[in-house]
Image (cartoon, grey):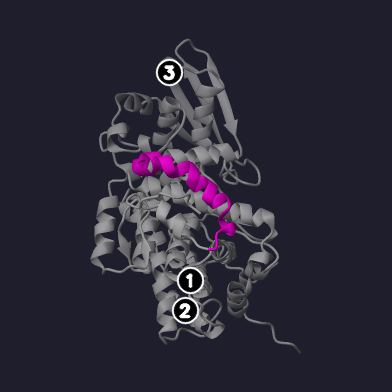
Amino acid sequence: METAIPLVDRLVTHALGITFEDLDPHTLIRVKTRLLDTLGAMAAGHGSQDAPAVLRVAAAWGSGDDAGIPGTSLRLPAASAAFANSVLARSFDFEPVEADGPEGTRVAAHISGTTVPVALALAELTGASGEELLTALAVGDDITARLAVASGFDVYSGADNTGTVNALGATLMAARMLGLDAPTAKHALGIAANQLGGTVANIFDAASAFKLPIALAAHTAITSAQLAAAGFTGANDPLEGKHGYFQMYCTDPKPALAGVCLGREFYGDTTIKPWSSCRAAHPSLEACIRLVTEEGVEVEQIKDVSIHITERTLNGFVGARFDPAERRVVAGLFSIHFTAAAGLLHGTVRPEHLTPEAMGDERIAALLERITLIGSLPNNQRLTAEATATLKDGSTRHVRVQYPAGDFASTPLENSVIEEKFQLNVAFGLPELAERAPRLIELVSGLELAESLEGFFGSLNPTAMITTPIA
């Protein structure tokens, strides 16, 4: 009887063997979109309070000339650059989210915030072409998404899977980009398994450490591949083996799911966020925005707003009431209470609405007093919300949102909206690069045509003199 090939070996073969020609046009579009959106999130991250600190720490780990930090002239070892860029991408919870997988599966995830910084750092280090960068990203995203949906992950477990599956998928992507053979790539995965972790306690406590699991995963991916290349060995089967990933970090795993349609379907983050906040807050936020933009509600006329969500959502971290006196950015990012108020006031929520100054707006405080969250919807409607505004004249307006905007399969954003988001993020975090944003969009759109990425990376450095067309 023929012995089944272990999942770990199938994924290693997949990671190292896929070619650009294996990518269908739909997959290529999704990869480019996630790349552009994550670059924008990285740019916006420079406007966060923590940005100077993370760059200082990464620089203190040691000098190097492997890769850069977009928006700066700073050069660092690849692992340090990937770490810092990943922190920046996560800063305003504005990067792509929510993985799809075989058989129509979905799971909460933030994959691109790890894979894009790792791929960019290693593309600079290795002198990769546009085709090589895009193929590596397709592979890294696909493996990470497959492991995520196969894990049975539930965000309410308290774990943060940005620090587990991201490290595993990105490690095999790094192994590919560094030219490792199959046995060495497998060892890299085993080495990475020693560095998995993360807790959503960071979010409950509004701690800036919520940015770290996704970034430590990026650092782990590159260092694990480098250690394996140097001769270190890892566990024989770090996925399905005894004390492997599925046993150690998963409560209801389905490992076989990760191998379904391998090489024929490519998965990854499915949602490009239209608003800067936790995806679980988006149904409520969209309902409040539509009260103003579609139902004609004037903020000054609001007596109160009732927002109906699931009880599970209400009891999770996004259900906590926001205290405007504290002006904690992380608390606002993960608060339906705050984002609903900001959505009513501004008609959107972007990084500029999540600074301490903007969060202290007296109009926000007044709206917060009028908003009530009610856990009345069935728990299987996690991405559904209803908002009812009672006006001072006694009339009411009601909006129900079942599928918030941004999901490529059900509620995709127009390309123009995605591009506008990118340009606004660059203008917010890296105003010195604002004039280059349209050209960067063009470069990403035709990235597979670039035999060299030198011009692309140069365009991300504000001190680089761009005297010829970037190509």
Distance from disc 3 to disc 2, alpha carbons, whole Å, reads: 58 Å
Q: Nearer the viewer, residue 182 or 128?
A: 128
Q: Residue at x 47, y 68 (%)?
A: 127
Instruction: Please name the predominant secondary structure of the magenta segment in the image.
Output: helix
Q: Is 238 a magenta residue? A: no
Q: Nearer the viewer, mark 1 or mark 3?
A: 1
Measuring from the top left, give residue 430's x and y in whole percent.
35, 44
Q: Which mark is residue 57?
A: none
Q: Secondary structure at mark 2?
A: helix
Residue at image coords 49%, 45%? 439
* Circles 2 and 1: CB atoms closer than 8 Å: yes
Q: Amino acid at mark 1?
A: Ala
Residue range of the region highlighted in magenta in the rendering: 425-451
Calculate the distance from the C-alpha at mark 2 to the C-alpha at mark 1.
Answer: 9 Å
Mark 2 or mark 1, which has the lower sequence index?
A: 1
Asked whether 436 falls inside the magenta stretch, the response is: yes
Query: Is the residue marked by circle 1 packed among few (<14), some (14-19), or many (20+) residues within 10 Å?
Result: many
Q: In this rendering, does residue 321 appear at all?
A: no
Q: Secondary structure at mark 1?
A: helix
What residue is shown with label 3? 303
Residue 68 spot, x, y in % from top left: 36, 60
Q: Which residue is mark 1?
A: 174
Q: Earlier in the sequence, mark 3 or mark 2?
A: 2
